[in-house]
Image (tube, rainbow, N blue to C red):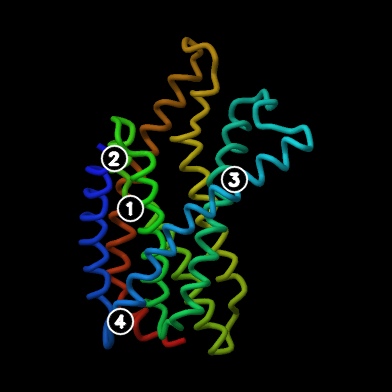
């Protein structure tokens, strides 16, 4: 089943990425620049696992674990931030920076493509690892979320580079490039994978139903958000293609 889910993810994201490559105006990147960042995205997921293990061992040696946190909401946020939101985005950032160093994108849109490709690589390995059951199939609903996070990161790094070249304020763009995906990723995982409902021992607790509803609302919002984000990329592709860095 996990192979079926991996193939479905690869086909859907492959079609999307092929369309995104065609949206660049005036030039097109070569195959190496298009596909190496996807492989680096796979490596980013492996790097995340290493970071997670390192952080867990460090906190355990200090005598701290998230299990000692009593408040379920704080526990959920701490778990989401330390196990996903922060370390996954650090790994993504490192691989995007490596891709930029290797291929020297020529315009802001190529930065967007780089971020998207790394996000696709992250998604493919996650679908293989977490696929294979009903919960895994539900991941297909928000299949593009890592791609969108990568687009956001790549876009604002690119705009930062463009602003720096043209002697405009740029530091805020770099901050946005990292902080926005971290925040969105953490909140998404709080509402889904590490929803406070799973930390509530009493299933009849009224908070359980509330957090389940919040989780369902988050899935609906994220599903719509993906399509809006991709549509905006298509709309603005010509403008970003003209922003040379």
Q: How far, Cα to Cα, is label 1 from label 3? A: 23 Å
User: At x 53% / y 82%, what residue is drawn?
Assistant: 163
Q: How far, Cα to Cα, is label 4 from label 1? A: 23 Å
Vertical relation: 83 (above or below) 149: above
Residue 145 percent coordinates (x, y)? 37, 51
Which residue is label 3 attached to? Answer: 52
Q: How far, Cα to Cα, is label 2 from label 4? A: 31 Å
Q: Which mark is residue 51?
A: none
User: At x 33% / y 70%, what residue is drawn?
Assistant: 35
Kindly indicate whether the residue at mark 2 contacts the one at mark 1 (C-beta within 8 angstroms): no
Q: Earlier in the sequence, mark 1 or mark 2?
A: 2
User: Disc 2 vs disc 4: which is toward the camera?
Assistant: 2
Q: Earlier in the sequence, mark 1 or mark 3?
A: 3
Q: Secondary structure at mark 4?
A: loop
User: Disc 4 vs disc 1: which is toward the camera?
Assistant: 4
Vertical relation: 202 (above or below) 54: above
């Amino acid at each position: 089943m996990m192979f079926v889910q991996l193939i479905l993810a690869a086909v859907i994201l492959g079609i999307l990425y092929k369309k995104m490559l065609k949206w660049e105006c005036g030039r097109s990147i070569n195959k190496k620049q298009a596909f190496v960042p996807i492989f680096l995205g796979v490596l980013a997921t492996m790097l995340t696992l290493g970071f997670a293990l390192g952080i867990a061992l460090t906190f355990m040696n200090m005598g701290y674990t998230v299990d000692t946190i009593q408040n379920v909401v704080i526990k959920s946020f701490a778990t989401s931030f330390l196990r996903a939101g922060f370390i996954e985005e650090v790994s993504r950032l490192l691989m995007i920076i490596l891709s930029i160093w290797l291929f020297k994108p020529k315009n802001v849109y190529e930065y967007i493509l780089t971020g998207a490709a790394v996000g696709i690589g992250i998604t493919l390995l996650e679908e293989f690892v977490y696929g294979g059951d009903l919960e895994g199939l539900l991941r297909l609903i928000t299949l593009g979320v890592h791609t969108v996070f990568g687009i956001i990161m790549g876009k604002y790094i690119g705009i930062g580079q463009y602003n720096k070249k043209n002697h405009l304020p740029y530091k805020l763009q770099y901050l946005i490039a990292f902080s926005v995906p971290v925040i969105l990723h953490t909140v998404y995982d709080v509402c889904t994978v590490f929803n406070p409902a799973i930390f509530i021992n009493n299933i009849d607790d009224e908070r359980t139903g509330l957090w389940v509803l919040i989780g369902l609302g988050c899935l609906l919002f994220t599903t719509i958000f993906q399509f809006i984000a991709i549509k905006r990329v298509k709309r603005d592709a010509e403008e970003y293609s003209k922003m040379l860095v």
